[in-house]
Image: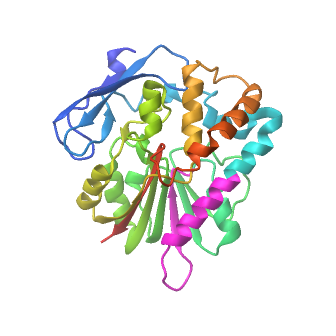
Amino acid sequence: MEDKYLEAVSVCPVCSSGNHTKFIATPALMHHTEDTFSFSCCGQCNAAFLNPRVTTDHLKTYYPDYYLPYRGAAAWGKYRGFVDRSQQKMDKKRLKTCKKFGSKNTGPIKLLDVGCGNPTFLQTLSQNTDWQLTGIDFTDEGWKNSGNLSFKLITGDVQAMELAEKFDLVTMWHYLEHDYNPNKTLASLRKHLKTGGKVIIEVPDYLSLTAKWQQAHWEGWHTPRHTLLYTKSAFERLAASNGYKLLKHYRYGTLDAFTLWWMGTMEKKKANWAGSMETEFFPLVWKKVYTAPLFMLEKWLPLGIQTVVLEAV
């Protein structure tokens, strides 16, 4: 890649330390180029950050039409029903997590989902709660053909968001690893969050066993779309700097850790991400069966996903 599309990162985006060293080099993942990138590791908070990183103006190059999350269940052809049910199962797990940390105050909970994309999670909430729901994303690609929905959707930048209401709960499901300035994002959200309100964040765990096994092919790097990968120490610093306290830290989440591992196996064999995924369905099922004894232990072993809950103070 030409240097004009890259920008050096001189200090850690989490804690602003200049003490960092090169950690790992990875190819562009889920993308058909020969580009390679490097992550640096901060010596203070242990966050790993892309350095240099792609300029925001050029980042759209890495979100082509064949990008699998854009194609979603449709990429699996006649097996799309299985993928839809998997998404529904994950959304219900997210609902359960939200109920656990939602406000106990009287009246409907006000929830903001940041990076809502295709808002299946919000649809699940609307069908199972009386909560007041809002979603925000940079683009309306995920919902522009969805028709009338029973919740509010905003196209825009969360860092520049200006809303009158204050929320009880904010969710970020695999959003913050894409963020170029997490401090600014969390500071903005604090202005729109009630004291005692919670922020639920789910991101990849680069210190996990699967990341160590798969190295540069581990899909949690998702290079260059993921610019930051976090540790508990990094989240503690983010919380303290922006008006929160770290309430909970789990080394598992609602996304099945198997999913990241499977995508890593696909990267290793140089999968054609632009093609139909139908032929990969039964190999995926077989891999899920024979790895089940391992991934059943994800609440006890760090296998690739982490969740944090911050409380506004």
Q: Residue at x 42, y 68 (%)?
A: 198
User: On the rendered structure, is 81 left or right of 71?
Assistant: right
- Observer able to see residue 215: yes
In this rendering, is residue 276 above or below 73?
above
Q: Residue at x 39, y 69 (%)?
A: 193
Q: Residue at x 46, y 48 (%)?
A: 301
Q: Position of residue 149 (x, y in %)?
A: 69, 60
Question: Magenta residues?
Answer: 88-116
Does the magenta run of residues contain 252? no
In which quadrant will I find the N terminus?
top left
Depth check: give the residue in front, 187 or 38: 38
Q: Residue at x 33, y 23 (%)?
A: 6
User: On the rendered structure, is 68 left or right of 257?
Assistant: right
Q: Position of residue 105 (x, y in %)?
A: 48, 84
In which quadrant will I find the C terminus?
bottom left
- Farthest residue in the front direction? 293
Depth check: give the residue in front, 242 or 104: 104
Q: Quadrant of residue 227?
A: top left
- Farthest residue in the left direction? 18
Q: Position of residue 210 (x, y in %)?
A: 47, 36
Q: How many marks?
A: 0
Q: Position of residue 284 (x, y in %)?
A: 69, 33
User: On the rendered structure, is 176 left or right of 137?
Assistant: left
- Observer able to see residue 59: no
Does the magenta run of residues contain 92? yes
User: On the rendered structure, is 168 left or right of 87?
Assistant: left
The colouring scheme, among rainbow, by chain, secondary structure or one colour, is: rainbow
In this rendering, is residue 103 above or below 209?
below
Depth check: give the residue in front, 52 or 98: 98
Q: Quadrant of residue 27?
A: top left
